Amino acid sequence: MKKAQVKATKLEDYVSPAFLVDHVDLTFFLKPEATKVHSKLKIRQNSDCKQSLFLDGDALRLDTVVIDGRVLGQDEYECGEFSLSIPDFPSEAILEIVTFIDPVHNTKLEGLYLSSGNFCTQCEAEGFRRITYYPDRPDVMATYTVTVHADQDSYPVLLSNGNLIDQGVEEDGSHWAKWDDPFPKPSYLFALVAGDLACCEDSFKTRSGQDVTLKIFVEHGNEDKCAYAMDSLIRSMKWDEERFGLEYDLDIFNIVAVSDFNMGAMENKSLNIFNSKCILASPDTATDFEFERIEAIVAHEYFHNWTGNRVTCRDWFQLSLKEGLTVYRDQEFSADMRSAPVKRIQDVRTLRARQFPEDAGPLSHPIRPESYIEINNFYTSTVYEKGGEVIRMMAELLGKDGFRKGLDLYFERHDNQAVTCDDFVAAMEDANGANLKHFRLWYSQAGTPEVEANWSYDAQEKTFTLTLDQFTAPTPGQDVKQPLLIPFTVGLIGQNGAALPLKLEGENGDKQTTKRTLQFDQDHQIFTFVDVNELPVPSLNRNFSAPIKLSTKYTTGDLAFLMGHDKDAFSRWDAAQTYASRLMLKMVKSVQEGGVAEFDSQYADILAINIADKSLDPAFLAQMLGLPSIDYVTEQMEVADFAAVEKVRSVFKAGIAKALYGQFKELYLAGKEAAAYSPDSDSAGRRALCNTALGYLSVIENDPACLKLVVDQFEAADNMTDRMAALSLLADIPGEEREKALKAFESRYADNTLVMDKWFAVQATSTISNALEEVKKLLTHSAFSYKNPNKVRALIGAFSGANPARFHAEGGEGYRFLADSIIHLNGINPQVASKILAPLGSWRRMNATHQKMMKAELQRILDTEDLSNDVYEIASKSLV
Ligand code: B3K
Ligand code: ZN
């Protein structure tokens, strides 16, 4: 295999930098094909022994190297493909380097590149080395001064981090701006933008009275789509002050939205750069889900100013230090802005859909990985979402105030430093006098713990005994697992639905708590509750207190009871998920054994009770009515059969629809009476319920009245949420209406590239049998481009990642299509190529025929000439 020479970076090999940089002075002369970068670094030695100065570089053309004013000869340094090293570097010196780069041909979108003709940057994790030679590692923190020269007509807006301190115009038609960032930062937080952009402006007064100018820059014509992002930013700033006492620290905060971006957004100090998808929204172009996502991502990036920028990571193995913590913070923010239980349910859905499979597959890694080939491959659901869960568990164990004390101490100790996950946990411990030694295992142990809960009730003794067993299956490189400290929140529910008191055996006093978090930290542990006066139904892992897979001996009666009575909204919803999956798996089994898939109408009866309960929040009810995904159900099978689950799920859905036809019609019509569109949480919840009801009605076969409801909604909708909801239902119903709607949508939004992404995705995820053929045709559509990550994700990513039954089609054509796409993208944008590879790695869960086909495609990818490290790492790990 040609890639044998690739070297992994290991956490255990970490050594502190030999040289530090105190100040960086950069001057850019921007030209699309040959930008000149003059870098002036104030460098000092950081170790006692004399060493060479080693600088990272990638795709740079070196012009000059100067030390303290003296130009070096070519024999005084070594310039390799990815480095520049200077032997015998003085203990302190000013190093100047001039390089040239080629932004217009930078299709990797890392470093400095052009998006719709505007210059922009992406440096995390290792993009700065594609701008100039530098010790490109997060533990080298420096202050920056940046001067940007560019043609004034083409690039009237010139931005970088920090404050604008000077600007001017030259006689040759160019102009310049000088920016100064007083906060020391690692190179990955550097940013530069130059372009012809429109600006929306607002302001914020911090708690201590500082006025901050807020600006959002967008391509001309999009000025009317910034209001929600701006409002989200202001609410985030306020929330962070109130919840965590964290204030913004400069007079200016800029956001720039660009069309070509590898991910959602980037938290560069005071100059956040966003994928336009995560900024632009209007009722006519964005769905409620997108409004909510914009709010969360704007908040997430803003929150990084403290958790990530002021205190950053020592090395990339510590990525979860900033990402897990910031995910937790943005989740808490959204929970406060919207319905907290619904937010929790959505977050768990995401965790189960993305992180659980990752942790159960070939790419499983701890939230603090120990080795990587390409760090960009580790911006994973594990590091982010499971990392967020680990922070949440700490907050649960220490309590809200304890967690706040820990965070305060963390900032007090580490402001302006690059630190480790251990430093974070130590601050939590020290601020609370707690011992989190055992808890730390969550950072180093991969895999999702499987917890089995058993119980018994002794009516005579009035005791309830809960027995918990935990097991974590081996993951690559970790054969033996230890028991984790799992905060396991429980409640006991009496027959009439009342919460019973929870008193553990041997406990003093009359604890009257009805909800408590058990510290479950052994392989096998027994908890005995006393004074339990009646046979209860236990409610377990409430609010998803730990990221585990729970198996219980609940009877269907218990599940039905919890679906109607559990006061913990998450557990109430989860009972529905468990119940529905169980029924569907039973149906699959019966089909596989040659029988028929029969719908058990008892499930519909319990949903009917929920629908009739007018005290339920519509957003929550919509979640209760939402069925577990095909992936979620299939994951519980020993050998995955996506086609069977898809079929059974649609029978199940149709069964509910028929049984509750009247209720759904009523819900739908009641929801439709709502007032004019507003993106707020309550209105969005009403729409979610209404569209869920429509979703059920749409699967009632041979009922033209139902189909008409969908078509009418599509045609009459005054907002994108309703229009898109109807379109995605129509996309699953072959026929004239489908084609008509897709055409109408296409011509209405032909000029809106973001909306066209939705049009691509809705076709890529359609359940119609020839979805792949359609996707292939769409590759030649004028709005599609392999160079734009959003387009690739909307069409290729959505097909392979969110249309499991078509992707795993019998003949293997889905696999071939994905491999072809990855091979093509490898030469354009390796980061995007490797991000869509994961579905091919799930071969172990398939039958032998599929396994063979999937492995062959992985091998074909590995045999590709000039394979990037990004793709090589994921493909090779997926194949073993
Ligand atoms: N920190 C960035 C992600 C960078 C990804 C680099 N491949 C956005 C975020 O997590 O906020
Ligand atoms: Zn982040």
Image: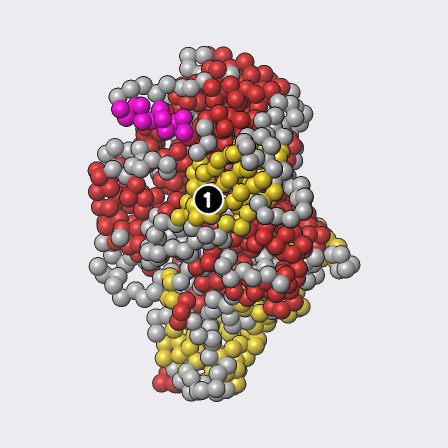
Residue 336 in the figure: left or right of residue 12: right
What count of labels does the image hold? 1
Majority secondary structure of magenta residues = helix
Q: Is residue 587 on the magenta stretch?
A: yes
Residue nearest the viewer, comparing 802 with 792: 802
Residue 368 occupies quadrant? bottom left
Residue at position x 50%, y 86% in the image: 91
Reply above or below: 471 against 708. Answer: below
Q: Give the residue displayed 27% in from the left and 66% down from the top.
A: 5
Residue marked by disc 1? 468
Picture residue at 34% right of the left edge, 20% below the top: 597
Query: Does residue 632 appear to the left or right of 190 in the view shown?
Result: left
Q: Where is residue 430 in the image (x, y as percent from the top left)?
A: 61, 65
Q: Position of residue 226 (x, y in %)?
A: 62, 44
Q: Is residue 24 visible?
A: yes
- Up the image or down, 303 lies above or below 66; here it is above
Q: Where's residue 480, x and y in %?
A: 35, 56
The x, y position of residue 142, in whole percent, is: 56, 72
- Magenta segment boundaries in residue numbering: 582-593
- Ligand 2 within 8 angstroms of badge 1 C-beta: no
Q: Could you say which quadrant of the image residue 641 lies in?
A: top left
- How packed mark 1 is, by other alpha carbons closer than 10 Å (few <14, some 14-19, many 20 or more), is many
Outermost residue on the front side: it is 460
